Image (cartoon, rainbow, N blue to C red):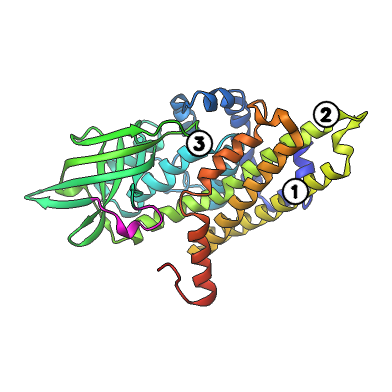
Amino acid sequence: MAENRSDILALDDELTDDERALRDTVREFVDRRIRPNIAHWFDEAHFPVEIVPELAQLGLLGMHLQGYGCAGRSAVDYGLAMQELEAGDSGIRTFVSVQGSLAMSAISKFGSEEQKQHWLPRMAAGEAIGCFGLTEPTAGSDPASMATTARLDGDEWVLRGAKRWIGLASVADVAIIWARTDEGVRGFVVPTDTAGFTATLIPQKLSMRASIQCDIALDDVRLPADAVLPGAKGLRGPFSCLNEARYGIAWGAVGAARDSYEAALGYALERTQFDRPIAGFQLTQAKLVDMVLEIQKAQLLVLRLGRLKDAGKLEPQMISLAKLNNTRIAIDIARQARTVIGGNGVTLDYSPLRHAANLESVRTYEGTDEVHTLILGERITGIAAFR
């Protein structure tokens, strides 16, 4: 019933039977495995590694990649899955994004055949976890200023530096590390048991608590010459992976917004004040209507994005538009939904404030509002305003 009350435009009709089936499968998984447990996981700052094999069984790890045990699903399929996972929690969607859109995509796009054969089937099966080391303590929005270096010493690469806010690093089996070399920025496939590699959990987070983010220290990490990703030279490599992740984020934010709205709607229909359900008051209805308006527009936006991606026509600026818009409206909806629930909404019995806290991170990573605004500003004016 809540779904019908969300979909005023009957956007479900724009999906194929297969797309709806996939969405419903992931939604059932979230209802069964995530919703009953997420309040505890969030409260305890616990990422449920135990669900990784289940995500793999659903074909969600590297699901948009072809071959090597990956599902080879469409961009719209991938987006729908990210939407449903983030309706459960941003931290769960983030795991799938880091694993598939960042670490696996880097190997798939730029790795050697040996690297692909060694890592991708295991990662698709959930037998190996990957992370993606680009952001540094002093290089977030400006990765060109990274300080991590890799130098050749005989037939070995030696990596030295630090990375920060790296998802999954403490549980990862392999890290894709981006470093400055004499020939520009290169990517490296780094088994995390390599001497000199250390991942440390970032504690006391107020956001993404059911997720893992880490500091990475690279203390003279020695790698064989063939550890480099042969197809990636310069920042175009990591940026192309970031765009894959940003695409999924734009879809995921819709899931968080929708779940916040549905929590508010359900509460408003049941909560009685002044002898009537609060859903019957004009101010409450205005809030609910505003939420639906933005959710429907955001859904149209990502569906258009997915069709363009499947047609090979997607441009980075289009992804920036969707990431900027959808994270922005999602956090506003989550906050507004909390006001409908009132004081009860500040507990983990209800999802909107948890979503709002998570979305502070989602809105920041893979490009802040400011960065995506400047990307779009350059597209509109032809003038780059980054410096």
Please tell me whether the stretch drawn in magenta is mainly helix, strand or loop. Answer: loop
Q: Which residue is mark 3?
A: 208
Residue at 27 percent across and 44 percent down: it is 162
* Disc 2 crowd, CA 10 A, few/some/many (<14, 14-19, 20+): some
* Disc 3 crowd, CA 10 A, few/some/many (<14, 14-19, 20+): many
* Image: magenta residue range: 139-148
- Residue nearer the viewer, 108 or 243: 243
* Residue 12 seen by the camera: yes
| The magenta stretch spans residue 146 | yes
Assign a secondary structure to mark 2. loop
Residue at 45 percent across and 24 percent down: it is 50
What's the residue type where badge 3 is placed? Answer: Met
- Residue nearer the viewer, 58 or 339: 339
- Residue nearer the viewer, 257 or 110: 257
* Disc 1 crowd, CA 10 A, few/some/many (<14, 14-19, 20+): many
Q: Give residue 67's position: percent from left, percent from top.
A: 39, 46
Q: Which residue is mark 2?
A: 271
Q: Give residue 131's position: percent from left, percent from top.
A: 36, 40
Q: Give residue 217's position: percent from left, percent from top.
A: 26, 39
Please say if the residues under marks 2 and 3 sit with CB atoms less than 8 Å apart: no
What's the residue type where badge 2 is placed? Answer: Arg
| The magenta stretch spans residue 306 | no
What is the number of the mark on residue 292? 1
The quarter holding residue 129 reads: top left
Assign a secondary structure to mark 3. loop
Quarter occupied by the C terminus: bottom left
The quarter holding residue 222 reads: top left
Of discs 1 and 2, which sits in the foreground? Answer: 2
What's the residue type where badge 1 is placed? Answer: Val
